[in-house]
Amino acid sequence: MRSIMLCRAAYLLIYADLAQEVGTPVARELRRAGLPTTLDESPDSYIPVYQAMNFVREVESREGINDIGLLAAQRLTCDRLSPYLAGLTSSASTLYDLFNRFATMIRLENTSAHASMCREKDLIRITISILGNVEPRKQRYVEWLQAMLPIQLIRDVVGASWSPVEITLRSRFDPGPEVYDTFPETRILVGSESTSILIPATLMTTTGRKDNDTRLVINKMSAVPQTLSQRSLDFRESLMVVLRSYVRESHLDVYLAAEIAGTSVRTLQRRLGTLGMSYSHLVQQVRFDAATEMLADPGQRVMDIARAVGYDDQAHFTRAFKRIAGISPTEYRRTLRST
């Protein structure tokens, strides 16, 4: 079974903001799409891409929003990126160095994303691909963001008015005046083989910004992004990562998990069985992992942590925690203080 395609919640929040502004009942639509309703509290959590696209499609259809992908891309700024990726503009020596490192870290934004650079005479093409079966009609919701991601990284170094020589998009459509108003000096090509931007090769020698930007503070990020930057997640890992975004729900329904995985409940349970675990055990592990991270913060009460990871009362949480760790949450916290 393939790994589940995931992206950071921060990107969906851009569309949710657009929906909120036109009066869409966002929480209701998120639930209808099978998405967590507390995304604004955890923009660095990971959500299923297909469910996110379904949310965007419904908002566009119900509200009659044109070019919703472009509207979202116009709102993309570096503070929407993971601290690991946003920090590249401050830590990279040159833009060439930045994009070499960007290619290894883009999976922090979308687990199925791939970036590459290639020389075309005196120009360099930066291509951003999503490696998965994305329906052509949904592709247009995300490809503007794909193109805007490297654009914003460059703008963060050279200035907000910079634009590429060319933008290519895979979707086939007639670019409206909004597109040319946004990129008046850029050649826009649609129906292309890939989503990319074309920039002068000389730009790559531009030195990065050196400052003490607070975006470099990454100690609040979980260990998951570090794993993603090193390798792709397998199916079990991707399911556990995405379920972390739903952990506040008191009941992580197996039917929802099967929908996220794009399969039937029976197939999901059979697949987990071959990995030596049941769905209920996987959910317990997800809640446990979330709880251990929260317990490391002495400012959080055990009672509040219990609710935050989906337990109705502290006693139930303590019993579940003890089944995995062999000690209570309070005792576990005590061991952290002694190390």
Image: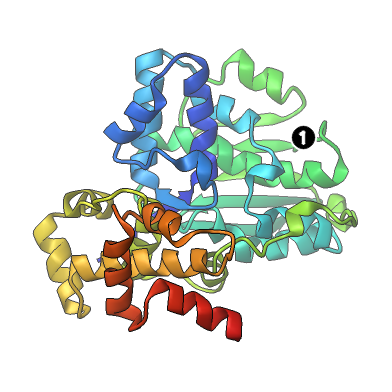
Instruction: Tell me how many marks there are.
Output: 1
Q: Position of residue 72 (x, y in %)?
A: 56, 30
Q: Where is residue 78 in the image (x, y as percent from the top left)?
A: 70, 44
Q: Residue at x 72, y 42 (%)?
A: 152
Q: Position of residue 48 (x, y in %)?
A: 37, 49
Relative to 262, does residue 324 appear above or below in the rendering?
below
Residue 121 in view in this figure: no
Q: Which residue is drawn at 36% across and 70% down?
A: 234
186 relative position to 331: left or right:
right
Which quadrant holds the N terminus?
A: bottom left
Q: Mark 1 points at which residue?
A: 163
Q: Where is residue 280 in the image (x, y as percent from the top left)?
A: 20, 66
29 relative position to 171: left or right:
left
- Which residue occupies the foreground of this view, 7 or 2? 7
Q: Which residue is drawn at 57% across and 24% down?
A: 71
- Which residue occupies the foreground of this view, 252 or 93? 252
Q: Which residue is drawn at 67% across and 55% down?
A: 83
The amino acid sitting under disc 1 is Ser
- Which residue occupies the foreground of this view, 301 or 7? 301
122 relative position to 45: left or right:
right
Relative to 37, does residue 259 appear above or below in the rendering?
below
